[in-house]
Image: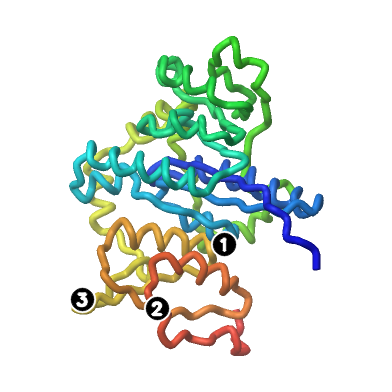
Amino acid sequence: MKPSRTPLRVLNYAVNGQGLGHLTRLLAINRQLRRLATLLDIPTEILFLTSSEADSLVYQHDFAAFKIPSKTAVAACGMDSNRYRKIAKQWVWNAVNLCSPDILIVDTFPAGSFHELYDVLDFGSKNVFIYRAVRPEAAMLPAFQSALRGYHLILMPQEGGENASPVPAEVSDRVVTTGEILIRSASEILEREEARDRLGIPEGALAVYASTGGGGDAAAEALLGASAGGLDADVVRAALSDADSPGRLEVLRGGPTVLVDAAHNPAGAAVLTDALREAFTFTRLIGVVGVLADKDAEGILGALEPVLDEVDHPLDLAARDRPR
């Protein structure tokens, strides 16, 4: 019997509250890393440490994540920010030390969101920083620039063909520019109809994608501001007060609370998982899940797993000859 080989240990650090940008960039990199390692027959152990409230996305891509509450979640529960930073720093230091990675990959914040990574960068791993475009006033801070010196490789994705983020002169030889880092490769891009189906957009409905952009997207805030400024506030309030979306996180009754949601793909289930965490404080949550034969049942259940204590009496619709 061949002796087992020590795997290449890769640890990803994503601290971004309720956003997805940090996680999607790291997931994109690690999906490719996993493919290459498989082709080269290199055993790997890929883990994530994150404060993202969208950590279910990690599990959808068959990676494991260790979770700490985001600063947004902590503020909502009333925890003192100084106490949170003290606990979080110790948690991060111990977690990284125990994971003992060969490669540590960090996105956007080279020192972490509360300077928790300064000591971590000296733990002996090869450190890689994903330096997407950030606001100049943040990038030029002495603490930000100083932390860049702790990285062996700095990847700078060109977003919209640009990324002029500054680096100290002595580490400029560690910088490698890349194209945009996207979670899907070109071969995985969906046709329009399939994409709309996966997102749950009804046939004939107008779909509008709006993004506030990242720290380096200077035009996003002005663009969205101008768009929002053209709407009458009273009209918006009146429209939202009458808005109804049956079957989308709809509360049917209370005591106990009964909810229904029409999520029918992993993306919709991930959004449902995040919404349940943000809007409710259940001590126990039982899921009754029905999935048609042409849907990704495993992916849907995987996305819901972080919030469900039990799946009770699942509806076996997949076994039925049921027309679309």
**Which numbered circle lies on residue 153?**
none
Q: Position of residue 54 (x, y in %)?
A: 44, 52
Q: Quadrant of residue 3?
A: bottom right
Q: Is residue 213 left or right of residue 4?
A: left
Label 2 secondary element: strand
Residue highlighted by disc 2: 310
Give the tally of numbered discs: 3
Q: Is residue 170 visible?
A: yes
Q: Are marks 1 and 2 in contact (CB under 8 Å)?
A: no
Identify which residue is drawn at 38% across, 66% down.
307
Where is residue 311? Give x, y as percent.
Answer: 42, 80
Point out the tag, 1 or 2, that comes first from the N-terminus: 1
The colour style of the image is: rainbow
Marks 2/3: CA–CA distance: 19 Å
In the image as oriented, which residue stretches furthest toward the top? Answer: 169
Circle 3: residue type: Gly
Q: Quadrant of the C terminus?
A: bottom right
Contact flag, marks 1 and 3 (Cβ < 8 Å): no
Residue 102 vs residue 134: left or right? Answer: right
Viewer-side residue, 185 vs 124: 124
Which one is in front in this view, the residue at disc 2 or the one at disc 3? 2
Disc with the residue nearer the chain's start (2 vs 3): 3
| Residue tagged 3 | 254
Q: Quote the CA–CA distance across marks 1 and 2.
A: 25 Å
Residue 51, percent across and down?
Answer: 40, 46
| Mark 3 nearby-residue class (10 Å; few <14, some 14–19, many ≥20) | few
Mark 1 = which residue? 198
For the N terminus, the image quarter is: bottom right
Residue at 61% from the left image edge and 22% from the top image edge: 162
**Cα distance between the residues tagged 1 and 3:** 30 Å
